[in-house]
Structure formats: C-alpha cells, structure tokens
C-alpha cells in the first residue's frame, strides 16, 4: 500500500480514470432512449415579438414536441428564474424583472431561449428549428452599462438595477478632505467567457411522478430546490445528480433555463430528454464574467499612509438578474475591498445596469479578483505619482501581524497573516534584485521588460457548514459521502487522502461519493474556495464521532474501561491490553458482532469564521514594440493557504487560476457589435491562452495557519486568478511607463499594446 502521509504531495487518483476515457460526463450518462432537445435562440439583441409560429416544426419528421412560453403558461409554469436582489442605498429593493424560461413578449439578448424542440435525433431537432417562424420588431440596443438608453425592463427606469453602497461615506469623505495627496485611477475590467472544457448539459426523466434531473453543475441542492419550486413538487419529489464535470469556474454553479425546460419536456413526452450545448451556443448562453468599470481613489497623509479609499463602480448585469449577479460586484467585491492594507476609512458605491447582453454572474473568484485588481492597480499608480517604489508603498501600508485579528472597514475579520514577511519572501523568490539586469539585457535586444506585483487577499465564501458520512461496506471498502462537488478539482484524491491521514484506513479502499441529492441529504456544493476547508472540517467531525462510538465497543474485548481506549490515528490502544485493532479491523469486529450501527457514521460541522488566503504574485512581461506582442516571461506566486493537505494539488490549483488570470489579461475579451451580435462566439475569435502564452510558474507556500477552523486551512481554489490580473497588468504598466504610456487596460492584445506604445511615443515627442 502506498502511504498517504499528512501534507504529502500525492498525485491525483482520478487522473487514470479520466486519461483512459473512463470519465462519465453528462453526455455519457443520459438514458439511451432519451429524446434530444435543441434550443431556438433569439437572433437579435432587442425586439418585440410579434409572432411565433411553431406548427411546421411540430409536424417535422422525428419531432415529439415544441415548447414555447405559451405552452409553459398553459402547464402552469409561470415563475421566473431566481435572482438575488439587493437593497438600494435608500432602503428600497433593487429591480427584479422576471427572467422567463422562454422569451414571452420581448427578446432581450442574442441567445435568449425562445423555444425548445424535442426530437428523436439532434439533426431532426435542428432542422425543425429552422421551420419556426419568429417575427419581431427591432428595438434600439443598449450595450453600455449606464443610465439612459431604450428601457429593457419597465421595472428598471434608465436601465438601472440597483444603487448600492457600503462603508462610512462621511468619514471617508473627511479623510479625503484632509489628505496631503489624492490619487485617482479609472480601472475597466473586461468581460470574459468561462469556456469550460465540457459545455453545459442536462437530461431529465420522470418516474412514477418523481422528477430526476442530471446536469453538469457545482451543486445538486440549489438546483433541486429551484426545480421543486418551479414544478411545485414536494422535496422528496425531486432528485438531482451530477456526474463528472469538465470544468465549472463558478459559471456552472447556477441554474439555467434549459434545466427546467428538459424537465418539462420529459414530463410532456413521457420519455427522458437530454440537451447538450455546443460551443458557440455556450458562448451565447453561459453567464459571462467580470464586466465593470471602477474609479478608485486613495487619500494619503504626509508619511504616505493611506487615510481613505473610495471606489465607485458601474456594473453590467446583462439583460436579467442571474442567480447571484447583483451580489458579485457589491457584497462579494466588498469582502476584500481594502486588501491587506491598514486603511481606516473606505466607501464602496456601485450601480448595476441592464444591457442587451447575456447575464453576468460568478467567474473564478467572483468579485474578489475584481476588487483586488482595482486596489492593486491604483496602488501601483499611487506609487508612481508619489515617487515611491511600488513595493515600499505597499510595505508602508500593510497590516502587521501584531494587529491580528484585524477588523476591516467592510466588516471582515482577518484572523491571521504575515503580509510583510510574505512580501519579502516573494521578492527573494522572484529574484527582484536581478530584474534590472534582465531589463537591461532586453533593452539591448530592442525589447521592453516590466515587473508587476499584486498582493491579494481572498475571503472564503459559501455555506460555512458541511456534512460528511462514512460507511464501512461489506466488501471491506469505505465510502465517504461529501456535500461538495468536484468540477475538475482533485476532490476524490484530497478527501480520500484526508480520511486516510486521520484514520489509517487504506486510501485505495476509500471511495468518495458526491453529487446525488438522494444519497446525500444536504450539502453546500463547490464555490468560493470553500470545499476543502468545510469538507475537511466535517470529515474530522465524523472521525471524532467514529472513535467515540467504537471505544465502548472495543473496551470489553480489551478488558478496560471505555475512557481508557485511545485512538492514535492508526490503531486503538489501551494500557495493559495487547489488542491494537485498526479502524478497519474494529469495523469488521462490529460487523461480526451484529453491531451494524457502528458501520455508518455521519456528522455536520460549521466553521467559526471565514479564512483569508493571501499572497504576493510577481509577473515579468516582455513586450516586442514592433508587434505589440506581450509575453509573460516569469511568474512567481508565494501564497499563504494555511496548512495544506496536499501541496502538489494546491500548486496545481494556483497554476490553473493564474492561467485564467493571464488569459483575461493578455487575450480574452468579449466583443459585441453595435447591434448586440456576439463577435467572439468561437475559438477562432475568442482567444483562450495557449501553452506558448505561459511561462514556467514558481510557487512557494508560506503558511500562517488559520484560527477559523480546526485544521488551520485557508482554501486555494481561486487564489491564482485573484492575484494574476493585477500582477500582469502592473507589469505591462511598468514596461510602458518609461515609454510615455500612463494608462494601460486589459486585454493587452498585440494590436492594443502596439497602439499604446505608439501613443506613448507620440506624447513623448
């Protein structure tokens, strides 16, 4: 048996299954007799529907049914989809227009579902869709988040969804009035497409009046609750399952119209119905990410200490409230508003607007990358305007270890952290002292090199409670039921390794079960970097319960009192007894004695507070001024994730997050034309980062254990993206500053960067 030691860099056990084609994704799990659904989507961004004739489609070969909004209404399905609504600054509720499953009277973005066609084959469904006659009167299109434009919803005058604020506006204003120096910077954050390797999909069936929906997602219980509500079913009347998932990144954490539509189609047709998105369809219909513009202001005293921080943002929500869309750039942004800096006064004011684009919601980091990007960009600008080294300005203003626990102006409570010490470690790891020589070498070759720093902090989000269940099976294996949901992360490895570490159970005999609302009654799913921290804490609670349950049972055979039985992480022992059964052996003894209650253990645990991963990311870029091409040449991440279960897999999470940050910084960008048509609807037009865009990554862990959970962990799933955006952007700014360019904004495509260089040269004369 391979020994899984505590904190050891164990390779992923699920990789063999995936790499040998044994993964079971949503497309492979649908019943063979399932009908195939195709969605007819809006071809325009804004229009009034004047006619929708589906008669020819219903009569087409192989077609079983066509669903429209009228059909849903006739079946009593009239609810709109859920969407979080904020409270405005004046106490009123934010606008919450109905988001229908299928367009009812108006088309509001290209790709909005209009009808669902269900047929024997996909081609039959697609052919029938072309027979549908959709007539409409075009309306003016609104694409820029801001007041005015043609109203998209009557509930949102001026297309404004909300006007939200957090912080002490008066105290912050006073800090600015008394400031020695104020630095201001406008910071756009471009829209991106999540582009998971596996597109979204779902299938549904009804058996004896009970609904089963299987989908590619990140949480079965959120989906179950919404399906129950939409179809007016009892909780036991719905089952949701999630098989292997090929990437989620927050985009798959949410409900989408198609999941409800296939459920209704299965009910009407009497057969299972499946729908799988194609790539361009995904780019049109998946929730987008980011898409906001912020103005950041820093107030400084004479010693260059920050006395106030003020941010105002305009946020693009798309055409509707998606599930968490209103919360992303408000509540979640505010979690890390002031970063790792000792800022006494801060104020955040955000306005959200509807536009004729697809809805926007969570994308890896969900508000925290956006907040850190704004802060770290304006910190870099401030250093340049104040004539200081950007690293030194950060060091002057950092929260010190002796200030922990530290209450932030936005209401967070940082429990631990050594930000100055980690910053020093990052400088050494990135060989900052050698940067001048590297820059000079590139200049001799006609290239421009820049170095960028971002110090990030992240707040772990999501349900702080989680459950776990351990069952000893008859064949000697152990099943661990978890309430989180892997969507490409290494949960099968980490959770099995953790249970093995704490119990001595052979890791190869542990099977992890997830993603089935029938087998796991409750769970928080995956999102907000919560999984390992919450699930590990819950598993630890189960282990404690198991040990407590087995001790009285074993005491009789050991000839001791129950309180004398101890578990050392591998075996049970007691003074004076030569019996030292392992947990697996104790389970077999219980089975032989008919004590089946000792073979099944469950527990729930709740974290006492959030944990705060943090770290310094250092990027070096090289720019070819002749072409504008930007290459990330070096990338160093030094992170504090607290205690690690598996350092190898934590580093892998950082790599993935950094790549997504680099992708947004130098390549990825959603573009619509003036009519709202998506111009980046394929990988020919939407540029994901390629292997040759990426450097080798330097990673180091400098842990300061968290006090918010018994394991001292802090989470790591989104940290790479939180740090990468500003690190790369600040490196580009550093490279071009000496060439006269004062404002650089993502994405740094060759054309945009070349134009920045030309403009800077022109200004410099």
Image (cartoon, rainbow, N blue to C red):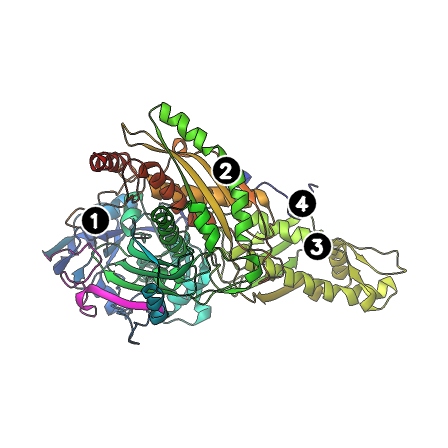
For label 3, the SS is helix
Q: Nearer the viewer, mark 2 or mark 1?
A: 2
Q: CA distance from mark 3 to mark 2?
A: 39 Å
User: With 720 as the anchor, is 358 left or right in this view?
Assistant: left
Q: Nearer the viewer, mark 3 or mark 2?
A: 2
Which residue position holds label 4?
A: 4
Which residue position holds label 2?
A: 430
Q: Residue at x 28, y 75 (%)?
A: 90
| Region of the chain picked out in magenta, as a range | 138-166
Q: CA distance from mark 2 to mark 4?
A: 31 Å
Q: Residue at x 36, y 56 (%)?
A: 271
Q: Quadrant of the N terminus?
A: top right
Q: Looking at the image, is mark 2 or mark 4 earlier in the sequence?
A: 4
Residue 503, numbered circle: 3
> Does 72 appear above or below 639?
below
Q: Any magenta on residue 153?
A: yes
Q: Looking at the image, is mark 4 or mark 1 earlier in the sequence?
A: 4
Q: CA distance from mark 3 to mark 1?
A: 58 Å
Residue 552, numbered circle: none
**Closest to the observer, 466 or 200:** 466
Q: Residue at x 34, y 41 (%)?
A: 733
Residue 651 spot, x, y in % from top left: 53, 43
Residue 128, numbered circle: 1
Q: Nearer the viewer, mark 3 or mark 1?
A: 3
Q: Is residue 14 visible?
A: no
Q: Looking at the image, is mark 4 or mark 3 earlier in the sequence?
A: 4
């Amino acid at each position: 048996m391979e020994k899984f030691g505590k904190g050891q860099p164990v390779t992923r056990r699920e990789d063999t299954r995936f790499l040998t084609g044994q993964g079971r994704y949503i497309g492979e799990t649908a019943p063979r007799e399932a009908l195939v659904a195709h969605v007819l989507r809006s071809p325009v961004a804004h229009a009034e529907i004047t006619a929708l004739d589906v008669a020819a489609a219903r009569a087409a070969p192989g077609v079983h049914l066509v669903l429209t909004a009228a059909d849903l209404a006739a079946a009593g399905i009239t609810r709109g989809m859920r969407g979080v609504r904020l409270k405005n600054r004046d106490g009123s509720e934010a606008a919450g227009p109905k988001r229908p499953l299928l367009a009812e009277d108006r088309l509001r973005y290209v790709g909005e579902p209009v009808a669902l066609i269900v047929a024997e084959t996909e081609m039959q469904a697609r052919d029938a869709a072309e027979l549908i006659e959709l007539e409409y009167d075009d309306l003016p299109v609104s694409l820029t988040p801001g007041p005015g434009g043609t109203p998209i919803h009557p509930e949102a005058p001026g297309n404004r969804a909300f006007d939200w604020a957090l912080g002490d506006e008066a105290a912050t204003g006073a800090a600015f009035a008394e400031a020695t120096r104020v630095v201001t910077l406008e910071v756009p954050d471009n829209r991106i497409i999540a582009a998971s390797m596996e597109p979204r999909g779902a299938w549904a069936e009804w058996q004896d009046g009970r609904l089963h929906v299987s989908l590619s997602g990140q949480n079965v219980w959120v989906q179950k609750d919404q399906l129950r509500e939409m179809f007016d079913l009892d909780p036991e009347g719905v089952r949701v399952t999630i098989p292997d998932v090929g990437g989620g990144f927050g985009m798959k954490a949410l409900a989408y119209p198609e999941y409800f539509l296939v459920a209704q189609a299965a009910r009407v047709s009497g057969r299972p119905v499946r729908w799988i998105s194609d790539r361009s369809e995904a780019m049109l219909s998946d929730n987008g990410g980011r898409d906001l513009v912020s103005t950041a202001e820093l107030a400084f005293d004479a010693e260059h200490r920050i006395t106030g921080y003020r941010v105002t943002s305009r946020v693009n929500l798309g055409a509707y409230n998606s599930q968490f869309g209103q919360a992303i750039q408000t509540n979640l942004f505010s979690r890390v508003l002031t970063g790792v800096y000792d800022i006494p006064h801060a104020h955040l004011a955000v306005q959200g607007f509807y536009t004729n684009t697809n809805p926007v919601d969570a994308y890896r980091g969900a508000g925290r990358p956006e907040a850190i990007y704004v802060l770290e960009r304006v910190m870099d600008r401030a250093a340049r305007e104040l004539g200081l080294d950007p690293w030194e300005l950060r060091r002057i203003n950092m929260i010190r270890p002796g200030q922990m626990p530290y209450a932030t102006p936005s209401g967070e409570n940082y429990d631990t952290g050594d930000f100055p010490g980690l910053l020093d470690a990052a400088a050494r790891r990135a060989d900052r002292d050698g940067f001048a020589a590297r820059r000079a070498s590139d200049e001799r070759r006609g290239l421009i090199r820049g170095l960028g720093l971002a110090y990030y902090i992240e707040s772990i989000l999501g349900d702080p409670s989680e459950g776990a269940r351990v069952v000893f099976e008859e064949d000697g294996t152990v099943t661990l039921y978890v309430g989180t949901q892997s969507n490409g992360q290494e949960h099968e490895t980490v959770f099995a390794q953790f249970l093995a570490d704490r119990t001595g159970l052979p890791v190869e005999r542990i099977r992890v079960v997830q993603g089935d609302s029938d087998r796991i009654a409750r769970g928080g799913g995956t999102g907000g970097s919560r999984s390992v921290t919450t699930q590990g804490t819950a598993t630890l609670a189960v282990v404690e319960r198991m040990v407590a349950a087995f001790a009285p049972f074993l005491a009789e055979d050991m000839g001791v009192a129950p309180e004398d039985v101890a578990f050392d992480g591998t075996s049970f022992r007691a003074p004076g007894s030569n019996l030292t059964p392992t947990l697996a052996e104790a389970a077999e003894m219980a089975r032989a004695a008919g004590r089946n209650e000792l073979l099944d253990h469950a527990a729930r645990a709740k974290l006492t507070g959030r944990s705060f991963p943090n770290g310094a990311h250092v990027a070096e870029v090289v720019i070819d001024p002749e072409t504008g091409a930007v290459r990330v040449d070096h990338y160093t991440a030094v992170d504090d994730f607290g205690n690690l279960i598996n350092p190898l897999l934590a580093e892998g999470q950082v790599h993935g997050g950094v790549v997504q940050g680099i992708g947004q910084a130098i390549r990825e960008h959603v573009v619509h034309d003036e009519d709202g048509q998506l111009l980046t609807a394929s990988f020919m037009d939407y540029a994901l980062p390629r292997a040759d865009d990426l450097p080798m990554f330097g990673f180091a862990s400098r842990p300061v254990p968290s006090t918010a959970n018994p394991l001292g962990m802090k989470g790591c799933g989104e940290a790479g993206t939180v740090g990468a955006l500003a690190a790369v952007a600040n490196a580009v700014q550093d490279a071009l500053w000496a060439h006269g360019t004062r404002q650089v904004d993502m994405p740094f495509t060759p054309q945009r960067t070349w134009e920045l260089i030309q403009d800077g040269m022109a200004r410099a004369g």
